[in-house]
Amino acid sequence: MKKNSIKNKISEKIVRFSGFSHIFNDMDTLLLVRLKHIHFIGIGGISMSGLAEILLGEDFVISGSDSKSSPLTQALEKKGATIYYGQRATNITDDVDVVVYTAAIHPDNPEFACAKEKGLPMLTRAELLGQIMRNYDTPVAISGTHGKTTTTSMISHILLAGDCDPTISVGGILPAIGGNIRVGNSETFVTEACEYTNSFLSFFPKISIILNMDADHLDFFKDIEDIKNSFHKFASQTADDGLIIINGDMEHTDFILNGLAQKHVTFGLNPENDYTATDIAFDKEGNASYNLVAHGEPKGRIALNVKGCHNVMNSLAAIACTEAIGLPLDAIRKGHLSFGGTHRRFEYKGSLGDVTVIDAKQSVDYLSSGVIEHKVENALHVSMNDETQI
């Protein structure tokens, strides 16, 4: 039976987590109220819509609200969700059992305020995602200031190439799964883990990946020290028998790993890392390839269908993860070649004469970062032989 009977277990964990009334018969037995109807405030978001879709597949009654109709909300409606356009207290109907909301929802939101007044249990998006992840034997969480969506997508392609039938929650539109969510029947769950508002501290993964760490989201974090502490806490929540996969080229790697007993492996361009790349090259379209070295052993050539040295780093993290899950190199190579990028992440749109058109809408917000300026230059100028114009 798939995913340890997720219908019952999600109900149990939401009830326990949210403070529903319960009675202990003994230390190991918990009697609880069965949940049925879950309402999402802001259901049209890329992650919220994915969670709603997962729960629709488990026979929960799903409702939600958003400011306007979108392809994501329309898809949910077709699958049976009730969607309200505009957020009003009346959307919190009497049969709602629990309310899920995002960090963008404030206490003065009419639905939020109504749910509080009614005394309904409430979960953040991250808390619900964390509870769903606990129903899988191998939950994988991909964190980092940059590259989460791309690396999650790479890992997803490799798992699909290896016939692993994973459940996937990705923060972008991934053509291979026809959207942002895929519900599989195996015990593997793959998701992004965002540090903003410490969302990723609601996750308890079997495999944790830390791609990089920069001074970002300073509207929430006090400073880089605050960010370092959050990533250390995230790593510490990896299962005792799990694996931490971390960028060994980072300045703060030792701090993040300090005092942690979980097994870890490093990746990066420094040859001392457990997973590293040599002889990096780019084809005429700017797609990268390299010789993989894992634990000091040459593993042969890896060819990517995406551009830039930063994607070599993402690839190394994806390989460390999927090897840990048990996939062979043939599936890893096949998955890499099938992945051509996610929607609006340096997405190739076409060319006109000497001008190549790249849709980088989802990356523009990062241009104030010196690291990302270098990444953009590397991906679009160096790897494309200076023929791209921005």
Image: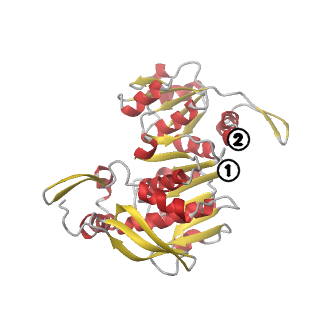
| Inter-mark Cα distance, 2 to 1 | 9 Å
Of the residues shown, which amino acid type is indicated by label 2? Answer: Asn
- The residue drawn where x is 47% and y is 64% is 211
Mark drawn on residue 67: none
- Residue 237 falls left or right of residue 212: right
Which corner quadrant holds the C terminus?
A: bottom left
Q: Where 329 sits versus 30, above or below? A: below
Q: Label 2 crowding class (10 Å Cα cut-off): few <14, some 14-19, many 20+?
A: some
Q: Nearer the viewer, residue 124 or 326?
A: 326
Q: Would you name the residue on which mark 2 appears?
A: 4
Q: Residue at x 59, y 46 (%)?
A: 130
**Quarter location, residue 25:** top right
Tell me where residue 372 appears, x and y as whole percent. Answer: 33, 64
Q: Is residue 61 visible?
A: yes
Kind of residue indicated by mark 1: Asp
Relative to 212, 206 lies left or right: right
At horizontal 58% and vertical 77% (from top left) the residue drawn is 295
Checking the image for residue 137, the label placed there is: 1
Please state, as top left, top right, bottom left or bottom right, where the N terminus lies in the image: top right
Query: For this view, does 95 lie left or right of residue 64?
Result: right
**Residue 339: x, y in percent?**
41, 55
User: Are circles 2 and 1 on residues that touch, CB within 8 Å?
Assistant: yes
With respect to residue 195, does 2 lie above or below? Answer: above
